[in-house]
Image (cartoon, helix red, strand yellow):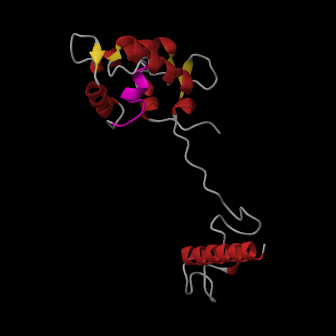
């Protein structure tokens, strides 16, 4: 499973100028150039942390979204040049391009949901350390007394006490 993508993938998706659902590297270059014009608020050809945060709020959805000011500022001089911005954005494109074909297809732009463990992950126990085959807690099962969290905490405390006892006899 590959690493999940972030808000920058949405930015690249809107760079699909011919609407064929494929972002070619040429389209990305044009889009990155346009994004730099949104970032640079003055004629000095430099972007401050504030400029990057303002751009990120609009283009990425949050001022703190990645890539952020520190991601762009390669030489750590607290200013982002046009070259630094464009180099970082090309790097982001390359990271998303999983098959290195210089284009982004939709499957390379989607956020992969986290995988939740299912079933008994650890020798008959679920990920909380409880044996769920006995029900949700208490004599009647299905939460007839204690919650699953309470059972897990009690079981974990018992395990810790057992470990302490075995260390004392060691």
Residue 5 vertical placement versus 44 (above, below): below
Magenta stretch holds residue 11: no
* Residue drawn 28% across the image and 11% down it: 45
Image location (x, y in percent) of residue 127: 65, 64
Query: Quick one: 45 or 95, which is closer to the camera?
Result: 45
- Residue 140 as seen in the image, left or right of residue 8: right
Residue 144 vertical placement versus 74 (above, below): below
* Residue drawn 43% across the image and 30% down it: 8
Q: Residue furthest left?
A: 42
Image location (x, y in percent) of residue 93: 51, 22
Query: Quick one: 169 or 116, which is closer to the camera?
Result: 169
Residue 124 vertical placement versus 51 (above, below): below
Q: Main secondary structure of the magenta part?
A: loop
* Residue drawn 48% across the image and 11% down it: 26
- Quadrant location, the N terminus: top right
Q: Which residues are magenta?
A: 64-74
- Residue 63 as seen in the image, left or right of residue 167: left
Q: Quadrant of residue 86?
A: top left
- Residue 78 as seen in the image, left or right of residue 89: left
């Amino acid at each position: 499973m590959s690493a999940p993508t972030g808000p920058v993938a949405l930015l690249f998706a809107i760079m699909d100028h011919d609407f064929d659902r494929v972002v070619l590297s040429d389209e990305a270059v044009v889009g990155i150039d346009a994004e730099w014009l949104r970032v640079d608020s003055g004629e000095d050809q430099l972007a401050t942390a504030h400029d990057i945060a303002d751009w990120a709020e609009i283009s990425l959805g949050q001022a703190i979204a990645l890539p952020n000011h520190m991601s762009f500022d390669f030489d750590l001089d607290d200013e982002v040049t046009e070259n630094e911005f464009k180099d970082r954005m090309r790097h982001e494109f390359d990271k998303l391009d999983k098959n290195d074909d210089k284009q982004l297809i939709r499957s390379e732009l989607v956020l992969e949901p986290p995988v939740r463990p299912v079933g008994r992950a650890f020798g008959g126990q679920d990920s909380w350390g409880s044996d769920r085959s006995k029900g949700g807690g208490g004599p009647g099962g299905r939460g007839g007394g204690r919650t699953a969290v309470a059972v897990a905490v009690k079981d974990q405390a018992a395990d810790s006490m057992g470990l302490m006892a075995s260390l004392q006899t060691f």
